Image (cartoon, grey):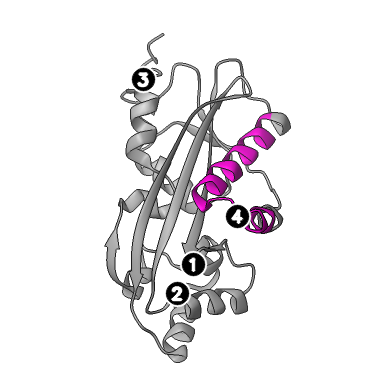
Amino acid sequence: MGEFARLPSGPLILASASKTRQALLGAAGIDFQCAPVSVDEATIRGSCAADDVDPLDVAVMLAEIKGKAACERTPPAPGQLLLAADQILSLDGVMFGKPATRDQAFGQLQRLQGQTHQLMTAAVIFRDGVRIWHHVETSTLQMRAMRDPDITAYLDVIGEAAFWGPGSYQLEGAGIHLFSRIDGGHTDILGLPMLQILAFLRGHGLTITPPGTAVPE
């Protein structure tokens, strides 16, 4: 279907290399460009855990750090909007980030199996280098009990997708088999609170525009 939802200020900048987030924006027809950045999320999470910072605040903090880094690395045009996001998984007060290895993914799933955890998804939007909006959604997910061979089989199925998000699950695919109950928005869990983002963007001129039609000023 292509890009049909456009902003008068130009393409939305996505400060992420996440294939899932790109797919969410693409499915909504958003005209966007990627400006991925790399930050030391593990160190920041560790420091915040030591200071007993609420995981929800950590999610917002990491999203903002990514947004600021993207604004500095590849400054958007004047007025152009930049979106950054982050997710923190919390189980009994312990924060989980994206696993870096298969062993880490296996360990996360071992900890999560048979338990109920929270997933905080934060999104921030910058304009002219300043954060002008943020939103956080918290989802509650109950993972079914699994044996180690079940976890191994699951990781064999999803391959590198295990490293795309905290908890190593891909709810839009094979990851749906991991859960017995889910309370939360589908896109929130995938990585972007799309309903809230779209509501904000409409307030800043986002319009559905057929291909070949000029964007209204």
The mark nearer the N terminus, 2 or 1, is 2
Q: Is residue 130 visible?
A: yes
The mark nearer the N terminus, 4 or 1, is 4
Q: Is residue 30 left or right of residue 50?
A: left
| Mark identifier at residue 52 | 4
Please tell me how crowded label 4 is: few (under 14), some (14-19), or many (20+) other residues with Cα within 10 Å. Answer: few
Q: Can you tell which of label 2 and label 4 is closer to the viewer?
A: 4
Q: Which residue is mark 2?
A: 112
Q: Which residue is mark 3?
A: 203
Q: Could you give the CA–CA distance between mark 1 and mark 3, rounded to whole angstroms?
A: 34 Å
Callout 3: SS: loop
Q: Is residue 89 above or below residue 85?
A: below
Q: Give, as a three-letter code, the residue at label 2.
A: Leu
Q: Is residue 206 above or below residue 57?
A: above
Tell me the residue at 35%/23% (across/down).
Answer: 202
Magenta stretch bounds: 45-71
Q: Give, as a three-letter code, the residue at label 4.
A: Asp
- Asked whether disc 2 touches disc 1, contact meaning CB atoms under 8 Å apart, the reply is yes
Q: Which residue is mark 1?
A: 167
Q: Could you give the CA–CA distance between mark 2 and mark 4, rounded to whole angstroms?
A: 21 Å
Q: Is residue 1 left or right of residue 98?
A: left
Q: Can you tell which of label 2 and label 1 is closer to the viewer?
A: 2
The mark nearer the N terminus, 1 or 3, is 1
Q: Can you tell which of label 2 and label 3 is closer to the viewer?
A: 2
Residue 117 percent location from the top left of the image:
41, 65
Q: Can you tell which of label 4 and label 1 is closer to the viewer?
A: 4
Count of numbered badges drawn on the protein:
4
Report the predominant secondary structure element of the magenta stretch.
helix
